[in-house]
Image: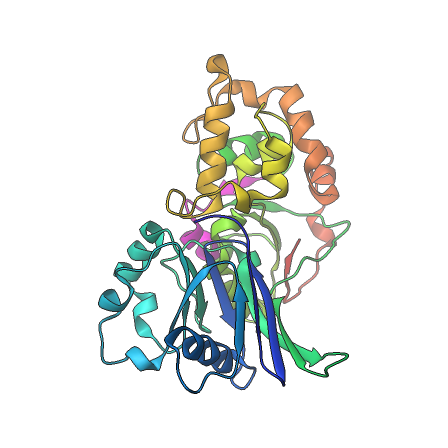
């Protein structure tokens, strides 16, 4: 299954509008915001219940897993569902299991999972974490419910980082260690180790570069930890591009048919049964698009990718803060004691 999927679900009083862009979407938020009503409306519609009051408009097949299935094994209920969007109500503990994670990655379905806790076994993007928000509509005066990104971008200027922590330990780490040759760059050796690496670091103003396509489950944990003031002497800024390979593709390092269209609308090209996350798709695309004499390898970066020409291309697509960081020595004395974690 691939492509964006639009939903419009409505009755005379309420209307839900949203578009799914990837195979995993997470809905967070407090009780009473309309999440349960949404799933119950979809369940009633798909089951032909006499309680149907909502009309569901979408081009996709869909399935709503609600408390109606609590006496059945989830594997039995979902086993035969293919090429569909599966909505799962919160409080279903099986979504945190390894077996469910394996099923999601291989099923070829899209998933919308309602839950407040991070699902560490699933590689979902920080950009696909939402909350339901509502406002009064015009005309028929329905209340309109829409998805709002839980984490948003911010703009930062004149940050003097005294340490860069890379989630990546392979090609991305090798590149940025060379690129930022005026500031220490270390690897966390995986997204699950980023927080501990931050805590162990003897630095007060830290930039973390992570693969945003699969970092969603860790972001909430990190924000909670720092925004609650547990680490008052550190300022953490996270830069979450889709992946290092996405950066290279965006910079035009590789020649690829329809590259502009792919980068503009990745959903149209990424079959979720083949790629558990967009990060894996961009890695494959980079490998297949690289020239034979300078074959891209995620595990070992060829020196060709550290040449001035390649670094210039990458520099031009980086945020201005990172371009500035590559040009001058950071001044850690300008950083104060803060409790903030920032995202840009």
Along the line of sight, the residue nearer the viewer: 317 or 137: 137
Give coordinates of residue 332: x percent, y percent: 68, 49
Q: Is residue 109 magenta?
A: no
| Image quadrant assignment for residue 241 | top right
Tell me, yes or no, if residue 188 can be seen here: yes
The image shows residue 211, relative to residue 27, as above or below, that is: above
Classify residue 96 as left or right of residue 325: left
**Magenta stretch, residue numbers:** 184-196
Q: Is residue 186 magenta?
A: yes
Along the line of sight, the residue nearer the viewer: 80 or 122: 80
The image shows residue 259, relative to residue 304, as above or below, that is: below
Give coordinates of residue 110: x percent, y percent: 43, 57
Classify residue 288 as left or right of residue 305: left
Give coordinates of residue 320: x percent, y percent: 75, 42
Residue at 52% of width from left, 19% of height from top? 303
Give coordinates of residue 190: x percent, y percent: 42, 47
The image shows residue 296, relative to residue 105, as above or below, that is: above
The image shows residue 130, relative to residue 134, as above or below, that is: above
Residue at 50% of width from left, 37% of height from top? 282
| Colour approach in the figure | rainbow
Tell me, yes or no, if residue 180 can be seen here: no
In this rendering, the count of numbered labels is: 0
Along the line of sight, the residue nearer the viewer: 301 or 283: 283
| Image quadrant assignment for residue 99 | bottom left
């Amino acid at each position: 299954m691939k492509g964006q999927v639009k939903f419009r679900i409505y009755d005379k009083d309420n209307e839900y509008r949203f578009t799914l862009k990837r195979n995993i979407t997470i809905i967070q938020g407090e009780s009473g915001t309309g999440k349960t009503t949404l799933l119950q409306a979809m369940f009633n519609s798909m089951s032909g219940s006499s309680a149907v009051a909502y009309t569901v408009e979408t081009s996709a097949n869909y399935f709503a897993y609600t408390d109606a299935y609590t006496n059945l094994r989830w594997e039995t209920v979902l086993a035969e569902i293919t090429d569909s969007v599966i909505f799962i109500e919160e409080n279903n503990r099986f979504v945190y299991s390894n077996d469910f994670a394996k099923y999601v990655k291989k099923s070829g379905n899209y998933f919308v999972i309602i839950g407040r806790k991070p699902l560490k076994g699933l590689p979902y993007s920080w950009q696909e974490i939402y909350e339901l928000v509502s406002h009064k509509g015009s005309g028929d005066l329905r209340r309109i419910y829409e998805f709002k990104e839980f984490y948003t971008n911010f703009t930062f200027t004149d940050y003097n980082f005294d340490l860069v922590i890379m989630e990546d330990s392979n090609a991305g780490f090798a590149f940025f260690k060379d690129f930022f040759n005026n500031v220490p760059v270390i690897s966390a050796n995986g997204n699950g180790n980023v927080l501990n690496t931050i805590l162990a670091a003897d630095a007060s103003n830290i930039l973390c570069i992570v693969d945003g396509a699969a970092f969603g489950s860790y972001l909430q944990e990190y924000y909670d930890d720092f925004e609650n003031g547990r680490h008052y002497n550190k300022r953490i800024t996270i830069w979450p591009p889709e992946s290092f390979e996405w950066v290279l593709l965006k910079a035009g390092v590789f020649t690829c048919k329809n590259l502009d269209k792919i980068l503009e609308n990745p959903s149209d090209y990424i079959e979720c049964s083949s790629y558990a996350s967009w990060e894996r798709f961009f890695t494959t695309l980079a490998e297949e698009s690289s020239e034979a004499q300078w074959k891209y390898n995620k595990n070992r970066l060829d020196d060709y990718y550290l040449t001035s020409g390649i670094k210039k291309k990458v520099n031009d697509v980086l945020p201005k803060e990172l371009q500035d960081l590559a040009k001058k020595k950071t001044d850690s004395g300008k950083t104060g004691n803060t409790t903030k974690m920032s995202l840009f």
